[in-house]
Image: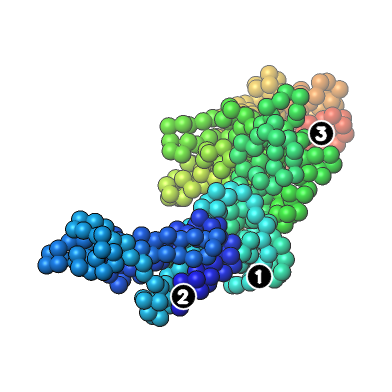
Amino acid sequence: MRSEDLISSFGEIARSKDMDRDTLQIIVEDVFRAMLRKRYGSDEAFEIIFNPKQGDIQILHIQEVVGNWEVEDPVTEIKESDAKEIDENFEVGDEVAGGLDVSEFGRRAVMTARQTFRQRIRDIEKEQVYQEYTELIGEIVVGEIYQVRRHETLLMHEDTELVLPRDEQIPGDHYRKGNMLRTVVKEVRRDAGSDPQVVVSRTSPVFMERLFEVEVPEVHDGIVEIKKVARIPGDRAKVAVESHDEKVDPVGACVGVKGVRINAVVRELSDENIDVMQWSDDPQELIARALSPAEPTNVTLNEDEDPPRARVEVPADEVSQAIGKRGVNIKLASRLTSHEIDVYREIPPDEEDIDIEQFGDELTDETIEKLERIGCDTGKAVLELSADALARRADLDRETASRVMEIIETEFEKGPGIIESIRQGRFTVESIQGAEATGTDGTTPSETSPEANVSAEAEPEEPAAPEAPADANDDQPETADADDETRADDETRETEDPSTDTPEANDDEGVEDDDAEEPSEEEKQDVGSAPEEPEVRS
């Protein structure tokens, strides 16, 4: 094969790969030098002249003239007699430049040169792809889907294959061959001897940032800065933004009129819910905003831990909002603020609750720690969750979660004892010490025990039966006392002599009953409302 034919085939390959002339010249020289090294063992004595415009190449073999019997390396040296055959003017020490024809290398060498040329072009292409897409990391590219596999989807972008792994796809997305898809370049992998692999993503927070840059001119121009993005792809995201112009509302700029701008981003992300909030350099304020729609009443930071933690107190009816469905809201808030957030329910002063640590005799320290970690620091905070939700959020097995619920429910069913209730000021106990206490505190003598009544009235005076009607018109406490003393006197008589059953006694009883038949309405209510045991009033 002539050198012109070989160079022509090289040119066709280079044009098909859209390769520039300088790169082609470098590759051709490298290919021929490889041929020379393979044939002569070294290429130091050769010079290659390549003319890409004319499409020809010239190889010069440069040798030094030495004495006829002094040749040590025939590649770099030539005998004086051989040099004079070329030109009689050559002497010892001169350099002789002779041309080489490509056909002298043989057919096999020429085929090897063509293969080497193609390999060099592929290596250069790999390097170009690596450099090009390394510069595009974090930028959006639009590719055409040409193959959908089980664990990945392949896209074609400017004759370069892009790989969209399964874990970089938004859950619920469905791809069809031939559709155009927007992604962001995540990384470029290059292993030795293999083609560079361009990995793209749709779940990266950077993808959402670039979409806002496309849809919101203020973000593209740098007036509004996206400080941080936290995403659970396909479900929910939180975006913290800050304005560098006092006249521009960062949240309003990102949302747009009637939500036009943010809706475009939401549609691209398969209806992912996006919360846009204003950034704050104060961690406490940022955490309070990140837990929206809940409104924390107190935020306490602990920067000594790694990562730093935050204790957040929210009203009892907003705990579920702060945590969110499946813990999504608190998880996103933690990512956005770089703090581990513990949500605690704010307990009103008049609400009775039990600290979760009080169950230490029935629950293990590990279980209590897990409950406190998710904000269930009181018994009622735990009872607000179902057993399944408690098991999922606190990382407990279903049996342990059910047992925790049962223990706490049982404790609340018992309720506080009377002594504890009195200590808390929720109940008062009123008692009667004797008949004399009736007139001073307004309680009835029947509230004392039967033994106390008998002891206090062991020697009652004999009341006259006719005096009952006269007492009926007196004050209510005196009437009640007279009636009770009469009944107590009868009980005393029966105790002293159970066998006494005389007509006089029966007549007295009858008189007493007749006298007591028509008391006033106030007397009836007073006598009937007196309990037989100490009264506990709430």
Q: Amino acid at mark 3?
A: Gln
For image coordinates 12% across by 64% down, the residue present is 70
For image coordinates 77% across by 40% down, the residue present is 255
> Dot 2: what SS?
loop
**Which residue position holds label 1?**
146
Neighbour tally class for label 3: few under 14, some 14-19, many 20 plus, Cα within 10 Å: few
Depth order, front residue of 449/312: 312
Image vertical order of residue 277 relative to residue 186, above or below: above
For image coordinates 30% across by 72% down, the residue present is 39
Disc 3 from disc 2: Cα separation: 133 Å
| N-terminal label among 2 and 1 | 2
Q: Nearer the viewer, mark 2 or mark 1?
A: 2
**Which residue position holds label 2?**
2
**Which residue position holds label 3?**
525
Neighbour tally class for label 2: few under 14, some 14-19, many 20 plus, Cα within 10 Å: few
For image coordinates 62% across by 53% down, the residue present is 184
> Dot 3: what SS?
helix
